[in-house]
Image: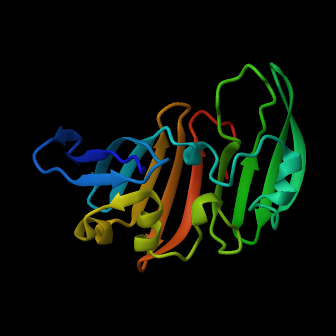
Amino acid sequence: MTKTRLIPLIFLFAGNAICGDTLQVLANRGFEITSAVERSPDTLVVVTCAAYVFYPFGQLKSSSELQTSPLRHIHIRRFQKVQKDGVFQYYMLQFHSSHLILFFDDDKEAERSSYIMNGEIADSHVGFAKRVRIGMTKEEFASVFFVSMPTDRLVSYNAVEFESCVEGIRHIYEFEHNRLKRVRFQSVGSIWHF
């Protein structure tokens, strides 16, 4: 049986939460939504603890898994960064106008965290988990994560942001002419920026 949850959408006006109008968003199974907020008329922010926000290219545990992942077409360059806690391995991935910085935490006692430090995907040759891809329509994108979302609201969004309920991870899905144009990844507190 499919488990879904209705989430009311809270609209933000001038930085104040107003609970007048609500939008019922029905999430697909496996994509639990903590909250959904309309940051501006064209941006929906969804806070979630779903695995996808941590692992948008599949649950990769080490760099050796990159060659069998949706990221296998991207050029990989490994480098080290000396920090006060030690020397750490990072991976810079580049493919045309797409780039990512990854870090694989091999600490067995660490809590769940994303391997993505920062980056942007803008090439349709780079695949994501859950059939997400650059060039898909807003409707196709919404059907991956939501059972229902009012069409009038969906057409007004130029960006959908997924924020993790912990860890400060953010994906920003940007649409242009009803198609997914790019996905930007941000990790709050990350020392890496493009």
> Is residue 27 left or right of 67 when viewed as pictured?
left
- In this view, the residue in front, 84 or 12, is 12
**Residue reaching furthest front?**
1
Identify which residue is drawn at 61% across, 43% down. Answer: 54
Identify which residue is drawn at 66% across, 54% down. Answer: 119
Question: Percent position (x, y) of residue 187?
Answer: 59, 40
Question: Percent position (x, y) of residue 162?
Answer: 47, 49
**Residue reaching furthest left?**
20
Give the image's coloring scheme: rainbow
> Is residue 193 left or right of 26 when viewed as pictured?
right
Identify which residue is drawn at 53% across, 35% down. Answer: 168
Question: Percent position (x, y) of residue 52?
Answer: 57, 48
191 lies above or below 153: above
- In this view, the residue in front, 193 or 36, is 36
187 lies above or below 161: above
Question: Percent position (x, y) of residue 167?
Answer: 56, 31
Identify which residue is drawn at 30% across, 62% down. Answer: 149
Location of residue 98 by image quarter: bottom right
98 lies above or below 57: below
**How many labels were placed on the picture?**
0
> Is residue 24 left or right of 189 when viewed as pictured?
left
